[in-house]
Image (cartoon, grey):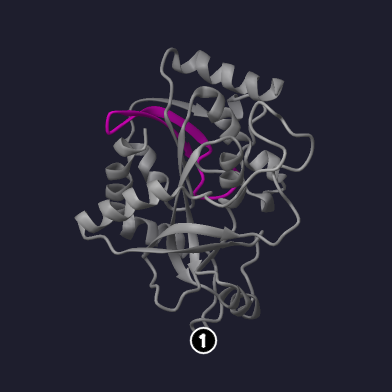
């Protein structure tokens, strides 16, 4: 608890009396949203006590705190992943710091591979639930009662009322917003075609290497969650003989930035 408090106190020393209400975690190719924050204070992760540092291209590793649509937001421009060598607790660490700063809701985004054959590259998917079959959990170890109970209910991680807001706003703007289940795989290697077939059988609509640990910790400490995935590619084996290299993420992010930004901005005022 002392570590979380030290991190929060450092951030408070930079932002003064401002208190963020929404945490936004921006995934690969989606960092452009941080450029839309007004009156921004920018803090490199490396300057914050006990924070990890992003090492992946497309993850700037900066905390941006300011206003978006009249709401004070805390934006993570880039995140940490387990495949970088971090533990689930380190990956999800910033969520608890955000809780101490007063955050009540979280928008978590990612670039994912489309498993559902009805999806197309560039689609946005509202996350309704997730699947994680790995043994790792960010709640492993001594429980910190100040954040939440030892045994955490996971029935409504991706808050139904926030999903309804997103669906209504997407419909108003003519955005084709999918809704489906996000399947977590640790990476950094892409999944094999056989693994993707298994994901589809188990009910996954998209697959990726992030989000689940942050969402789990948010659920544990009572933060409402809105999750949105950008389909950056079709998953392995869906397009015969196609190879995956991760280079499409930035390109697809650029192509989808207007609709992605518009949807997030439309939701923010209703998430306070």
Residue at point 60%, 80% (across, down) = 197
Identify the residue at the far right of this view: 141
| Picture quarter with the C terminus | top left
Position in image of residue 85 (x %, y %): 72, 48
Q: Residue at x 31, y 55 (%)?
A: 167
Q: Position of residue 63 (x, y in %)?
A: 49, 32
Q: Is residue 202 left or right of residue 77?
A: right
Q: Which residues are magenta?
A: 54-76
Q: How many marks?
A: 1
Residue in front for this viewpoint, 199 or 258: 199
Q: Is residue 69 above or below residue 163?
A: above
Asked if the stretch drawn in magenta spans residue 63, the answer is yes
Image quadrant containing the N terminus: top right
Q: Name the foreground residue: 87 vs 77.
A: 87
Q: Position of residue 49 (x, y in %)?
A: 65, 24
Point 32% across, 48% down: residue: 165
Report whether 153 appears left or right of 169: right
| Residue that sits furthest to the bottom in the current view | 240
Q: Please name whichever residue, 234 or 246, is drawn nearer the observer in this view of the structure.
A: 234
Q: Residues within 10 Å of mark 1 (few under 14, many from 20)?
A: few
Element class at badge 1: loop
Task: Confirm whether the magenta stretch covers residue 74.
Answer: yes
Pointer 1 residue:
240
Relative vertical location of residue 175 with respect to residue 267 in this rendering, above or below: below
**Image location (x, y in percent) of residue 206:** 51, 66
> Is 2 placed left or right of 253 in the picture?
right
Asked if 198 appears above or below 71 in the picture, the reply is: below
Instruction: Give me the residue at 72% from left, 44% from top.
Output: 87
Q: Is residue 124 left or right of residue 23?
A: left
């Amino acid at each position: 608890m002392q570590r979380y408090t030290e991190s929060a106190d450092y951030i408070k020393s930079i932002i003064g009396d401002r208190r963020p209400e929404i945490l936004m975690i921006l995934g690969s190719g989606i960092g452009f949203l941080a450029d839309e924050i007004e009156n921004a204070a920018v803090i490199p992760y490396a300057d914050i006590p006990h924070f990890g540092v992003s090492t992946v291209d497309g993850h700037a590793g900066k905390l941006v705190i300011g206003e978006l649509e009249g709401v004070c937001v805390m934006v993570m421009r880039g995140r940490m992943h387990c495949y970088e060598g971090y533990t689930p607790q380190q990956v999800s660490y910033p969520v608890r710091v955000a809780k101490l700063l007063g955050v009540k809701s979280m928008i978590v985004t990612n670039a994912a591979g489309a498993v559902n054959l009805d999806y197309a590259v560039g689609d946005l998917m509202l996350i309704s639930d997730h699947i994680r079959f790995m043994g790792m959990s960010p709640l492993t170890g001594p429980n910190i009662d100040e954040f939440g109970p030892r045994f955490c209910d996971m029935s409504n991680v991706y808050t139904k009322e926030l999903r309804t807001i997103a669906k209504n706003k997407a419909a108003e703007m003519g955005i084709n917003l999918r809704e489906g289940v996000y399947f977590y795989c640790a990476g950094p290697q892409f999944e094999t075609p056989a693994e993707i077939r298994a994901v589809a059988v188990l009910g996954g609509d998209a697959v990726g290497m992030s989000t689940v640990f942050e969402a789990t910790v948010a659920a544990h400490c009572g933060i409402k969650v809105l999750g949105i995935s950008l389909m950056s590619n079709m998953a392995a084996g869906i397009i015969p003989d196609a190879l995956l290299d991760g280079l499409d993420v930035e390109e697809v992010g650029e192509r989808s930035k207007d609709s992605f930004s518009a949807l997030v901005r439309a939701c923010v005022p209703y998430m306070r």
